[in-house]
Image (spheres, grey):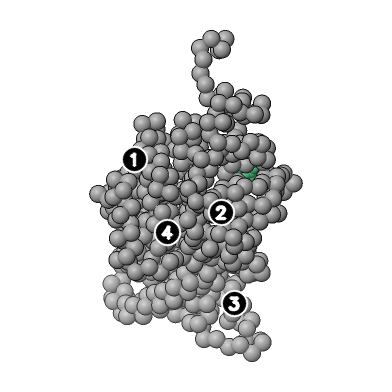
Amino acid sequence: MQLNWGFMEKYLPMYIDAAILTVKIAFGGILFSLITGFICAIVRYYKIPILNGIAIVYIELSRNTPLLVQLFFLYFGLPKIGVVLSAEACAIIGVTFLGGSYMAESIRSGFESIDKVQLESAASLDLGPWLTMKEVVFPQAIAVSVPGICANVIFLIKETSVVSGIALADLMYVTKDLIGLYYETDEALLMLVIFYLIILLPISIIASVLERRLRYAGFGD
Amino acid sequence: MENKVQLKINNLRKRFGTEVVLDGINLTVNKGEVVVVLGPSGCGKSTLLRCMNGLEAISEGEILLDGEKITAGSKEITKLRQKIGMVFQSYDLFPHKNILDNVTLAPIKVQKIPRKEAEERAEKLLRRVGLWKKRKAFPRELSGGQKQRAAIVRALCMNPEVMLFDEVTAALDPQMVREVLNVMLELAEGGMTMVIVTHEMQFARAVADKIIFLEKGKITEEAEPEEFFTNPKTETAKEFLQSFVYEKHKIQ
Ligand SMILES: Nc1ncnc2c1ncn2[C@@H]1O[C@H](COP(=O)(O)OP(=O)(O)OP(=O)(O)O)[C@@H](O)[C@H]1O
Ligand SMILES: [Mg+2]
């Protein structure tokens, strides 16, 4: 196979810009997913009335609709009721909407893994819900939640590829564009894969180091 | 011993669904008194202790601590928890904190005592149970007996007026039971008001000022230990005590 190096060199800056956009959307989306997920996990864990029901509906809705549909709703649907958001904002909100539910379930599974007697000890020391969460539940739960959270992070970065559907020039969009214009399919795809690997591999490595660290730091008996 | 009433339970009832687990409990615990609760499995011993510590909401009746009425779900439940320390059967230390942090967590965060003062309090108590050297160790690095002693110290560090013990030696290897019971005996001698659930009959006899025998959620006997162990009044109590006696010729 003969690769057209000149082509690749020429469009490299475009890929770099696209990669930056992908990272920006992913980073924003993941950050807000974690916040959303944490709030939902707390609401679900403490079964806070009303909010618990809302969280359940949100989680089901988010997990059972494709991200692209969520994006279309934000990008094409909302303007019809007068809410116009930039494509980038839509993308970040979309990733947050999707990721929040996955993060919520990972974080909650960590909370749920804490033995009941731990909660009772905390209660008998009169720690109260906030201190119990902060001092007892969260520090132990995080070790259980981290593998799931890391898997979600990687999943969400890959999911960002669908934002090309609302005309954002991310990696996927640039690639499709170049293939459509110049038929340099091999080169364009190769660069797509390389750029995703550049983004994802370090994260994957950090994730596995983190998981191993947490496992060895295991304090359970 | 002074005869000041420390804890009073009036007509306490506890239901789980339709099952009545505690059925009209009346109990008075004087200051410095040690009450041992005995009874067959499932008679409601743990539930009684858990109600006393506000871990279970009570269905009917009331608990008075120092004459102050405490009803479940009320704000005063907090007072109950700070004045009443509880130790459970399973080692319930926080596994991610070292022993000193386990012990000082609640005094610092809940009672808002300066760290230095809390650590001084902890040092005194940990030295007393021989665990000061282990203060930097994590629970997983301790034996079962050491963990239970640390759990006792953790409850004591709140300066409670009453201590509740629910079968704290039941999960221990026999050679470790002694070290934990010794700590409890020492506490009793020091004048701590205690309510103890145990299956160690020798210990119960030695430590108790009063024995309570619980049967299907009711107190069927209340007596001094000598009286209870030598001359139990109810059939169930007799059978219960008999179950701890091993006689060769009785086994076919
Ligand atoms: N959370 C609960 N929900 C429903 N039933 C319960 C609950 N906790 C206890 N019970 C029931 O209450 C009764 C008394 O239980 P409890 O644990 O107080 O007995 P116990 O005397 O401590 O027994 P053991 O000696 O085995 O520890 C049992 O029949 C038990 O099944
Ligand atoms: Mg019990």
Front of the two marks 2 and 3? 2
Asked if disc 1 and disc 4 are in contact, CB closer than 8 Å, the reply is: no
- Foreground mark, 2 or 4? 2
* Residue B158: mark: 4
Residues beneath discs 2 and 3 located on the same chain: no
Tell me the residue at 62%/41% (across/down).
B44
Q: Percent from the top left, x then y, of residue B204? A: 49, 35
Q: Is residue B139 left or right of residue A87?
A: left
Which of the labelled discs sits on residue B143, or is there none? 1
Q: Residue furthest bottom?
A: A82
Q: Image height check: is B98 above or below A62?
A: above
Identify the residue at horizontal 34%, vertical 43% (top origin).
B146
Given residues B223 and A195, the one toward you in this image is B223
Same chain shared by disc 1 and disc 2: yes
Task: Please state which of residues A15 and B138 is positioned toward the viewer in this rendering.
Answer: B138
Label 1 or label 2, whichever comes before in sequence order: 2
Disc 2 marks a residue whose amino acid type is Val
Numbered disc 4: secondary structure:
loop
Q: Would you say the residues marked 1 and 3 are in contact, meaning their CB atoms lie under 8 Å apart?
A: no
Q: Nearer the viewer, mark 1 or mark 4?
A: 4
Mark 1 or mark 4: name the one nearer the start of the chain: 1
Q: x%, y% of residue A95?
A: 51, 72
Q: Residue A119's spot in the image, x, y percent?
A: 50, 55
Q: Is residue B214 left or right of residue B173?
A: right
Quick one: label 4, few (<14), some, or many (20+) residues within 10 Å? Answer: many
Q: Which residue is mark 2?
A: B5
Q: Tell me which amino acid carries mark 3.
A: Phe
Q: Quadrant of the C terminus of chain B?
A: top right
Q: Name the front one of labels 1 and 3.
A: 1
Q: CA distance from mark 1 to mark 3?
A: 60 Å
Residue with the mark numbered 3? A72
